[in-house]
Amino acid sequence: MEETSVVFHWSVIRSLLSILQWWTFNVTVIIVNKWIFQKLDFKFPLTVSCVHFICSAIGAYVVIKVLKLKPLITVDPEDRWKRILPMSFVFCINIVLGNVSLRYIPVSFMQTIKSFTPATTVVLQWLVWRKYFDWRIWASLIPIVGGILLTSVTEMSFNMFGFCAALLGCLATSTKTILAESLLHGYKFDSINTVYYMAPYATMILVLPATLLEGNGVLEWLNTHPYPWSALIIIFSSGVLAFCLNFSIFYVIHSTTAVTFNVAGNLKVAVAVLVSWLIFRNPISYFNAVGCAVTLVGCTFYGYVRHLLSQQPPVPGTPRTPRTPRSKMELLPLVNDKLENKF
């Protein structure tokens, strides 16, 4: 009995530590990126995204090939072009839109809009793939949509371009999640193997437009910035942190349940909003804060409903609510649904 108690306590401690390190990396990446755009005046989101992809590709190679912490999942050469490349394109669009939105709107507003992802995922599956969803799923989207509307209307630092980029980022995340199951069918990817294969392709996709659209601006910034080398260290550090975030996602899912992951993910948004406000002091109205809170409560309820429905046997003659994408999938970068039983 005592041994069981010790194992239980260690499991709880491990879960808490995994959540804390995930929160730390996630919030740090967001804050550092916002610092780069706002404080360093490095207003080049495509270049920042490209740096992230390069660092992530190198980091995944070191983890799999050098340190051998994760086994390499072999992908057929033909599938790399037919499956991995299209997913890499969506992956690239998703990251770029997130950085573009950070360039123009506060972290608090961007994080709240990103919480709109469950709604866009459900609507896309319903419209495009004609998926059936239980009425409780639709009901759980009401507070999410209502919270987003209240936050957007009362946002004191509203920027239409940043808002549209964040909203399109939600659509890109939903599309990435939905396509992952079909395009990556048969490959039980984890987050590190996902980055290993997709980051190099994403770099190749982005390097040309980043050079053409932002190359001259970056060179001018290097010539005019008073401390360019220290600033470049911060920029490349954000890329290293972005890779560490992917690794931390793998560990937190391994150490927690799906419900815990969902709740922790929504609390993480609240932590990111609070930390960003303490650092950047962007103005937040009372109704804006209420809208953010309503959205997070709605996301938590959505995740709970998905988990509840996944535990129930399907009613004969009733179309089954699709198991993917789940709340866990929406936070994972391009992970196949079959991965869930492997952690």
Image: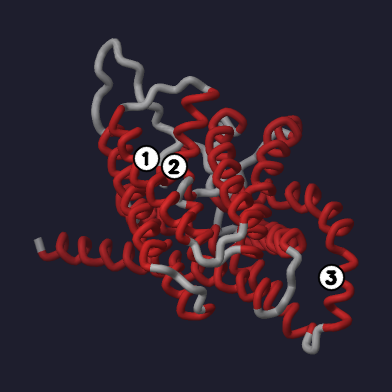
Q: Is residue 250 visible?
A: no
Question: Are the residues flagged by discs 2 and 1 in contact, CB closer than 8 Å?
Answer: yes
Question: Are the residues flagged by discs 2 and 3 in contact, CB closer than 8 Å?
Answer: no
**Which residue: 41% across, 44% down?**
145
On the image, numbered disc 2 is attached to which residue? 118
On the image, numbered disc 1 is attached to which residue? 141
Q: Is residue 125 above or below residue 175?
A: above
Point out the residue furthest to the left here: 1
On the image, numbered disc 3 is attached to which residue? 218
Q: Amino acid at mark 2?
A: Pro
Q: Nearer the viewer, mark 3 or mark 1?
A: 1
**Which residue: 71% across, 42% down?**
89
Dot 2 lies on which element?
helix
Q: Amino acid at mark 1?
A: Leu
Residue 317 in the image, given as x and y percentages of width and height:
29, 10
Q: Is residue 313 above or below residue 192?
A: above
First in residue order: circle 2 vs circle 3: 2
- How much space separates mark 3 and mark 1, taking CA atoms? 42 Å
Specify few, some or many for label 1: CA neighbours under 10 Å numbering under 14, 14-19, or 20 or more.
many
**Which residue: 87% across, 64% down?**
215
Q: Is residue 70 visible?
A: yes
Specify few, some or many for label 2: CA neighbours under 10 Å numbering under 14, 14-19, or 20 or more.
many
**Which residue: 69% across, 49% down?**
92
The quarter of the picture where residue 63 lies is bottom right
The quarter of the picture where residue 58 lies is bottom right
